[in-house]
Image (tube, rainbow, N blue to C red):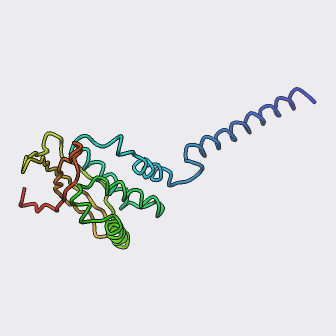
Amino acid sequence: MTKKTVKNIVILVVIALIVVYSFYVIIEKNGSGKSDSKTKSDVEKLADRNLDEDYPDTPKGVVDYYSQIITCLYEGGYSEDEMKELAKQAHKLMDDELASRNEFDDYYKNLREDVESYKADEKKISSYLVESGDDVKYKDFQERKYSFVDCTYYTKGKEGTAKVPEEYTLRMDKDGKWKILYWKMVNKNEK
């Protein structure tokens, strides 16, 4: 073999190694080639949060975490088991009074129907905005602490975009955790 042939072989081997390494990096970056890996990791992150050890400390934090879950649910891209896990997380944020009136199986069934309705209408929650922590209102009533948090959801669908303002009422439980007591859509004229 001549020096020129050896040089060409070395160059080809180096190029082949670069190509193989590039494919490896691309596959690892995309999570084994799954195009839906971002959504999957978001779902897993929300579902895997241990609320016994890492419960949001503020009313705004509770509404923000709940809104992350809801936004993820209405976006899609998860399995039936993952949907159920996300629904369990959302249910854990509810006050005992709300949870007792809305047993998990009923809550899950209604949530699933609502998500399917959004999907059929080609609609999803594109984003949300929880009011600033400074704007959260607090009230004591019958020796219990309550807070009121505004959150605006922005939806997108085949009929365009919409702004859905909601007010969450939270109540502090016996362990000092803020729990969702109820929420309602807010009429623009109410504020």
Q: How many marks?
A: 0
Q: Is residue 4 above or below residue 45?
A: above
Left or right for 141, reference 49: left
Q: Is residue 11 above or below residue 98?
A: above
Observer-nearest of 171 and 185: 171
Q: Is residue 117 above or below residue 126?
A: below
Seen at 34% across and 41% down, the residue is 54
Seen at 64% across and 40% down, the residue is 22
Question: Which quarter shows the N terminus?
Answer: top right
**Residue 89 figure quarter:** bottom left
Observer-nearest of 19 and 85: 85
Seen at 74% across and 39% down, the residue is 16
Q: Position of residue 66 (x, y in %)?
A: 29, 52
Observer-nearest of 147 and 173: 173
Left or right for 75, reference 100: right
Q: Is residue 166 visible?
A: yes
Seen at 47% across and 53% down, the residue is 40
In this view, the residue farthest toward the top is 3
Q: Is residue 122 visible?
A: no
Q: Position of residue 142 (x, y in %)?
A: 6, 51
Q: Position of residue 189 (x, y in %)?
A: 6, 61
Question: Which quarter shows the C terminus?
Answer: bottom left
Observer-nearest of 39 and 84: 84
Q: Position of residue 44 (x, y in %)?
A: 45, 50
